[in-house]
Image (cartoon, helix red, strand yellow):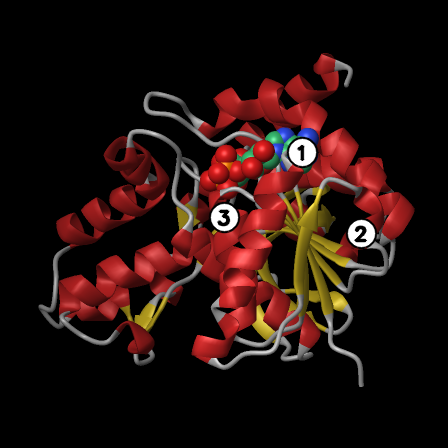
């Protein structure tokens, strides 16, 4: 059987890290596309030259011709501009709006059957634009945000409890970033929900509130430290987990930005909710019952996303 083909649109910090991880995991052959074709080609060659050392077989190439992505099974989009210190994700809207149109055209023409994962920010509106402009079915176009937000949440919880990250699960919903909604009663250590851990004296509500706040601002914390650009290792690892779930039909339950069609009382825009990812793309949207304060937080997050979609429409790109 031929290897899977994975196309990466954007060969910057996240794009390069994606290619390296895909190689190390032998998920398939990689085509890197970037407006700077030399960067894409250079990174492809460099990573391929590590393959004899790390014992993986993956053909990698790079350039600036969309024809090279033809027939890709998976496409991961990071094309666009990252945040700089002092910028919110929403500040990127105008800069990245035009980029999504070009990327959507390329995908529509050369790989309309691909499973597409968008990472470009502001995430929830960019993935919506990509789906609308490419015309691909909504179950095949998803946004990567929740896996990253929940990874950050899991790490901080594991550090707080001094337990393995493996044994911490986290449940987050909503838009990417400040308005993210962590459901602590569904977040656990080995199945024990956080509210029970507070009762058991493992931590306090104040500490959990601080962790939730740090998670929601997790991207900004890194932007401030890096001073030029934004996080790329954890975002890349998160998107690779989503790609792997699709390619291996793992049916993993992952928080992803997906188009809602009445679920959670919402319709016609993308926002983060738990979904099942398998060979059919988004195979199921998991709908949980909210408590009143959770419902209010989720609606607030959805309102923020909807406002950004309206702002995008006004740009007329
Ligand atoms: N088509 C293809 N590639 C493009 C285009 C375009 N129209 N415009 C820009 N690019 C490329 C840039 O040349 C650059 O190589 O996208 C790449 C982006 O890489 P970085 O600047 O290193 O940004 P990165 O950290 O990878 O983040 C990319 O993901 O998490 C989000 O907020 C982040 O929106 C940003 C995106």
Estimate the x, y position of residue 180 in percent, counting from the top left: 43, 43
The residue sitting at 43% across, 61% down in the picture is 171
Q: Secondary structure under badge 1?
A: loop
Q: Nearer the viewer, residue 173 or 82?
A: 82
**Residue at the disc numbered 1:** 35
Image: 309 above or below 217: above
The residue sitting at 9% across, 68% down in the picture is 201
Disc 2 or 3, which lies upstream in sequence? 3
Mark 2 or 3, which is nearer the eye?
A: 2
Q: CA distance from mark 1 to mark 3?
A: 15 Å
Q: Secondary structure under badge 2?
A: helix
For the N terminus, give its image quadrant.
bottom right
**Residue at the disc numbered 2:** 68
Disc 1 or 2, which lies upstream in sequence? 1
The answer as to whether callout 1 falls within 8 Å of ligand 1 is yes
The residue sitting at 35% across, 30% down in the picture is 228
Q: Which mark is residue 14?
A: 3
Q: Quadrant of residue 57?
A: bottom right
The answer as to whether callout 3 falls within 8 Å of ligand 1 is yes
Mark 1 or 3, which is nearer the eye?
A: 1
Ligand 1's quadrant: top right
Observer able to see residue 296: no
Estimate the x, y position of residue 229 in percent, counting from the top left: 39, 33
Q: Secondary structure under badge 3?
A: helix
């Amino acid at each position: 059987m031929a290897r899977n083909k994975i196309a990466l649109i954007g060969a910057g910090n996240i794009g390069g890290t994606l290619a390296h991880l895909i190689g190390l995991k032998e998920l398939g052959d990689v085509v890197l596309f970037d407006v700077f074709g030399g960067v894409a080609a250079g990174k492809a060659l460099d990573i391929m030259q590590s393959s004899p050392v790390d014992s993986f077989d993956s053909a990698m190439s790079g350039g600036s011709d969309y024809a090279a992505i033809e027939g890709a099974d998976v496409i991961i989009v990071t094309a666009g501009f990252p945040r700089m210190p002092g910028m919110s994700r929403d500040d990127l809207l105008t800069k990245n709006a035009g980029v999504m149109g070009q990327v959507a055209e390329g995908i529509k023409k050369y790989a309309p059957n691909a499973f597409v994962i968008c990472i470009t920010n502001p995430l929830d509106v960019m993935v919506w634009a990509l789906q609308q402009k490419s015309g691909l079915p909504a179950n095949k176009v998803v946004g990567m945000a929740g896996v990253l937000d929940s990874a950050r949440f899991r790490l901080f919880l594991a550090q707080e409890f001094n337990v393995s990250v493996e044994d911490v699960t986290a449940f987050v919903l909503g838009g990417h970033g400040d308005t993210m909604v962590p459901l602590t009663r569904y977040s656990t250590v080995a199945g024990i929900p956080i509210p029970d851990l507070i009762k058991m004296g493992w931590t306090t509500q104040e500490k959990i509130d601080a962790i939730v706040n740090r998670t929601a601002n997790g991207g900004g914390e890194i932007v401030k430290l890096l001073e030029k650009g934004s996080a790329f290792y954890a975002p890349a690892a998160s998107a690779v987990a989503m790609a792997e779930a699709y390619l291996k039909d793992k049916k993993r339950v992952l928080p992803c930005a997906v188009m809602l069609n009445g679920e959670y009382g919402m319709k016609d825009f993308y926002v983060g909710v738990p979904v099942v990812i398998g060979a059919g793309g988004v195979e199921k949207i998991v709908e949980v019952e909210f408590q009143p304060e959770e419902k209010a937080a989720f609606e607030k997050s959805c309102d923020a996303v909807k406002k950004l979609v309206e702002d995008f429409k006004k740009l007329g790109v």
